[in-house]
Amino acid sequence: MAEEKKTKKKVVKEEVKVEKRFCTHCGRELKDGEECNCKESKEAVSINTDVIKGYASSFVNVILNCFKRPQETVKEEVEKKDTTNNLIMLGALAISFGLYVVGAFGSIMGFFNSSLSSINNNYNISIPYFKIFLSVTIMYFILAFIPILVSFGIAKMSGSTKLEFKKAISLYTTSQAPQVVSYLIMALLYGLNILTWIGLIIGTIISVVCFFNYIIGYLDVTEIKGSRKSYSLSAFTILWVVVYIVILVLFIGNLISSVYKDIKITGNGYDYNINELEDWFNW
């Protein structure tokens, strides 16, 4: 009887004892019958990283090649019709332009702040820079579709079937790609408040180069022949400029009226809102 009891105790102990399992890759403890998928997750992450690296590399190459061989690069990128890359480039253009405008605005307001401080050190002008950046970035992204739509429409009216809408997007983003560099340089110079006039010169030169890249690319892609080429180019340029200016003025007017209300002057324990001061003076 005593031997039987000892045997039963041994059996119970053996049943309670469970061998633990661990993943050989990440070391995580596994439940009974569970398989770890850490290897698959790592592979998925590496694939996504490779995709991001690919887009970044393509983005940088397009900008560099637009400086080295602009006409060939514009033509090559237009034929690719890579909508994803084009939208990434358009987003980069919009963001860099937003940073440039905020830098310029900050530099101007820095001058006003210093002038105000010379009168009274306790006063300071507060500007909603993030709101300006967001508004300008969205504005640029929307306005970019004006030349895209105009070039596409004029090409169709001129009898060209070569310029598809995807190609029109590629034409704009690729020809304007060098502007990313100029906007960032200008934003940096304005932010540091040094050599701003050099930034303006650089920006103006690159803007002119980009405009001509666009025009040359438009003529190459559309392949419009004879006298239609002159009419098409004239209509394209005039319509682009007129529509762009009208919509730009509306955007700027709306932005100024919106930002104007958020500008505050602080000092001596007071917090003045611009429109509140305006009402006070009118009273």
Image: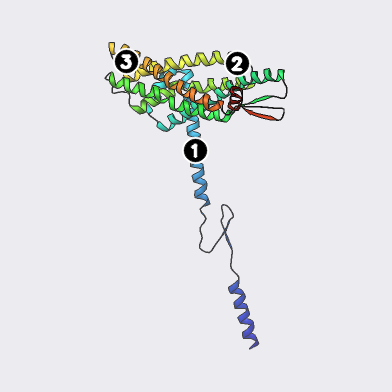
In the rendered view of the protein, which quadrant contains the N terminus? Answer: bottom right
Q: In this view, does 87 lie to the left or right of 279?
A: left
Above or below, comparing residue 165 to residue 40 in the picture? above
Which circle's residue, 3 or 2, is located before the other in the chain? Answer: 2
Q: In this view, does 3 lie to the left or right of 134?
A: right
Mark 2: which amino acid?
A: Thr
Mark 1: which amino acid?
A: Asp
Q: What element carries label 2?
A: helix
Above or below, comparing residue 110 to residue 87 in the picture? above
Q: Please identify, in this view, whether the residue under mark 1 or under mark 2 is nearer the observer.
A: 2
Which circle's residue, 1 or 2, is located before the other in the chain? Answer: 1
Identify residue for label 1.
Answer: 50
The image's mark for residue 96 is: none
Identify residue for label 3.
Answer: 232
**Residue drawn at 51 percent across, 44 percent down:** 45
**Residue drawn at 33 percent across, 26 percent down:** 164
Q: Is residue 172 left or right of residue 110?
A: left
Q: Distance between the residues labelled 3 and 2?
A: 37 Å
Q: Do the residues labelled 3 and 1 touch (CB within 8 Å)?
A: no
Q: What element carries label 1?
A: helix
Q: In this view, does 273 lie to the left or right of 65?
A: right
Q: Is mark 3 on a helix, strand or loop?
A: helix
Label 2: how many Cα within 10 Å (few below 14, some 14–19, many 20+): some
Seen from the viewer's position, the closer of residues 140 and 246 is 246
Q: Is residue 133 visible?
A: yes
Seen from the viewer's position, the closer of residues 137 and 272 is 272
**Residue drawn at 71 percent across, 18 percent down:** 119
Taking the view exactly as shown, the residue that stands out farthest to the bottom is 1
Residue 246, position as x, y percentages in the image: 42, 19
Seen from the viewer's position, the closer of residues 142 and 17 is 142
Identify residue for label 2.
Answer: 196
